[in-house]
Amino acid sequence: MRRELYRQDIKLEGLKTMAATSKAKSAEKTVENIVEAGKEKFEQAYKATTEAATKNIEKSFEVTKKQMEDAQKNFGELSTFSKQNLDAFVASSSAAAKGVEQISAEILAYSKKSVEDSLSAIKALSGAKNLREYFDLQNSLAKEGYDNLIAEAGRFSEMYVKLANDVFEPVNSRLATAMEQFGRATS
């Protein structure tokens, strides 16, 4: 009788261990799915942000080009004025190219770091000794990942603002000079 109860206890412990292992594997798969979904969302956001930035830059170039064309029609100092406008446009274009290159490099570095962090997280989770440790670690990693994402989003926002300022500065400076010249010409 005791032997039979002992065998039943062993079978019960084996079933509990199998259930815990199954839950851990399920949780690991969930984490992998979350990491993959996060990666896809980041890539989509990167693509959308890059496209929006490119469209805004192209639009600003179109506006600048139109302003240059209008100015050429209205003023006698065409040669000097046009050259200065072109110089501002070139400076603006150079700033845009440099800024987009820097932002792209930062995005690539962040993407690489995110993948490395995800792999490290998976390794750490697979090394958990029990479910409690697994879920504590998972919560900690999720919070850390969220905090990193928010920090990077803020940093990228600052980079885009700086890019916009750098791109528009030569054009704005040129517009201020042009307005000053136009004001004197109409007086």
Image (tube, rainbow, N blue to C red):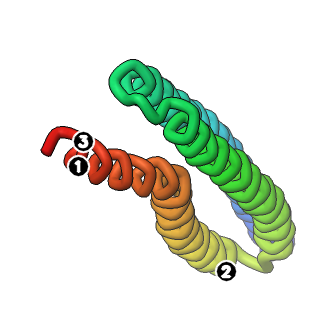
Where in the figure is residue 81, as x and y percent of width and height?
50, 39
Mark 2 or mark 1, which has the lower sequence index?
2
- State the residue position of label 2: 133
Which residue appears at 23% of the width and 49% of the height?
184
* Residue 138 shown left or right of residue 19 in the figure: left
Distance of mark 2 from mark 3, alpha carbons? Answer: 77 Å
Where in the figure is residue 67, as x and y percent of width and height?
40, 29
Say few, some or many: other residues with alpha carbon within 10 Å of mark 1 (under 14 / 14 to 19 / 20 or more): few
Callout 3: helix, strand or loop?
helix
Q: Which numbered marker is on residue 185? A: 3
Quadrant that contains the C terminus = top left
Please report contact status of discs 1 and 3: CB closer than 8 Å, yes or no.
Answer: yes
Callout 2: helix, strand or loop?
helix
Which residue appears at 62% of the width and 35% of the height?
47
Q: Which numbered marker is on residue 122? A: none
Callout 1: helix, strand or loop?
helix
Which residue appears at 78% of the width and 76% of the height?
128
- Amino acid at circle 3: Ala
Q: Which numbered marker is on residue 184? A: 1
